[in-house]
Image (cartoon, rainbow, N blue to C red):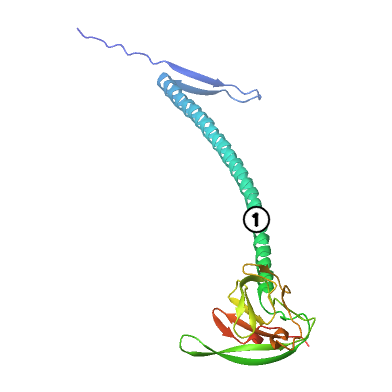
Amino acid sequence: MESRKKRKRRKNYVLLVVSDAPGDSVKHYRFTKARIRFNKILLSILLLVLVGYIMFSAFRNMVFVSREEVMRDTITELEEANAKLDEENQELAEKVNILSETVNQKVDAEKEQLKKNMPTGFPLSGTADMEEITETVQVEDEEVTRDLILFKAGDGVSVVASGAGSVLLADIDSVYGYQVQIDHGNGYISIYRSGTEPKVKNGDEVTRGTLLFEMESDDDDENASRMGYQIMKDGEYIKPTEVLEING
């Protein structure tokens, strides 16, 4: 017995494209079921790809927006930090200027004080005869020569401090009668030796021009009208004329 195999009839789908132009023929597009299935799968894949692309683009845009917001926040923070730094720099600059002015004022004051302390002033209130001489003294079994200016003046002329400082010594002098030493605080010591009693005592603070002795004419004591003037620098006697300002 011969068996007949029935062939399964394939279903076809026909797409008719009809033109409204007179005389144009009708176009037929035939699709099989498999082709339609393939087109559906392809269309689904394209749709999935499109959806995925849209979602990816949306996610990327969201990331970009988030990054932009972070960058904006970062820029804002940096701008605020920069503004704060500028303000702090301005305050610091003002403090530096104030400190610089203070230091300059202090330096100027120290210079002015140093100038006042320098024993450069004339040690008499008036005119007098002046003679540069040397004296020889015995120091520890050794004769030492010291420079000295000898001033001779009469009544009405006073011995005054040649610079500001403190009285280091006001005592008896073996040659002239009395002696006053002024420490000027800068390594200089001025020494005044005369025959009248000093007007200052140990530890007194003096300024330039402070009265130290009053000179007077005395036939019995020639030292009353004389004043021996000496300068020491860092413990060594120097020529008084090296620092003394003499006008006229």
Q: Nearer the viewer, residue 101 or 200?
A: 200
Q: On the rendered structure, is 234 left or right of 32? A: right
Report which quarter residue 97 is drawn in: bottom right
- State the residue at coordinates (64%, 62%): 103
Report which quarter residue 75 is drawn in: top right
Instruction: Tell me residue 197's x, y (percent).
Output: 68, 76
Q: Secondary structure at mark 1?
A: helix
Instruction: Tell me residue 184's x, y (percent).
Output: 63, 73
Q: Nearer the viewer, residue 40 or 15?
A: 40
Report which quarter residue 149 is drawn in: bottom right
Q: Quadrant of the C terminus?
A: bottom right
Instruction: Tell me residue 98's x, y (percent).
Output: 67, 57
Instruction: Tell me residue 45's x, y (percent).
Output: 44, 26
Q: Residue furthest top?
A: 1
Q: How many marks?
A: 1
Q: Which residue is mark 1?
A: 93
Judge the density around disc 1: few (<14), some (14-19), many (≥20) Cα neighbours within 10 Å.
Answer: few
Q: On the rendered structure, is 180 left or right of 126? A: left
Q: Quadrant of the N terminus?
A: top left
Asked if residue 210 is positioned above or below residue 7 in the image, the reply reads below
Q: Residue furthest right?
A: 156
Asked if residue 134 is positioned above or below residue 87 in the image, the reply reads below
Q: On the rendered structure, is 50 left or right of 239? A: left
Asked if residue 20 is positioned above or below residue 80 in the image, the reply reads above
